[in-house]
Amino acid sequence: MVKEDGLPLGLGFGLAMNEEAMNSFASMTEEEKRQVIEAARGVSSKEEMQNLVQNIAESGRVR
């Protein structure tokens, strides 16, 4: 499911629960945000989404 702003719900929830990841995401360029959103759309489990959000928090980008 995708929210109206195009952010997948799992990603939005994950960012809301992780302040460091939220701050990293907010400071990204539009292209970097697009890449994160595309990566989130490819996630097939809660664990994968948690890993994606943790990667954003730790490195400020998607690995």
Image (tube, rainbow, N blue to C red):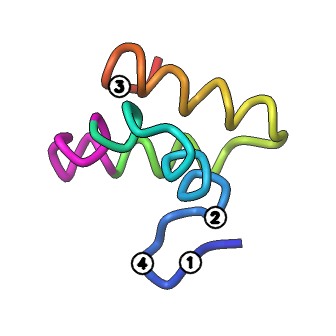
Helix, strand or loop: magenta stretch: helix
Tell me which residue sits at (62%, 73%) in the image: 2
Residue under pointer 3: 61
Distance CA(mark 1)–CA(mark 3): 21 Å
Tell me which residue sits at (37%, 31%) in the image: 20
Distance CA(mark 4)–CA(mark 1): 5 Å
For mark 1, does the 10 Å Cα neighbourhood hold few (<14), some (14 to 19), or many (20 or more) residues?
Answer: few
In this picture, residue 20 sits left or right of residue 40: left
For mark 2, does the 10 Å Cα neighbourhood hold few (<14), some (14 to 19), or many (20 or more) residues?
Answer: some
In this picture, residue 3 sits left or right of residue 43: left
Residue under pointer 1: 3
From the top left corner, tell me how far across and down residue 52 is, in percent.
58, 29
- Please tell me whether residue 25 belongs to the stretch shown in magenta: yes
Query: From what the image shows, is residue 27 above or below residue 63?
Result: below
Residue under pointer 4: 5
- Please tell me whether residue 43 belongs to the stretch shown in magenta: no
Discs 1, 3 touching: Cβ within 8 Å: no
Discs 4, 3 touching: Cβ within 8 Å: no
Discs 1, 2 touching: Cβ within 8 Å: yes
For mark 3, does the 10 Å Cα neighbourhood hold few (<14), some (14 to 19), or many (20 or more) residues?
Answer: some
The span shown in magenta is 24-33
Distance CA(mark 1)–CA(mark 2): 6 Å
In the picture, the disc for residue 9 is 2
Discs 4, 1 touching: Cβ within 8 Å: yes
The tag earlier along the polypeptide, 3 or 2, is 2
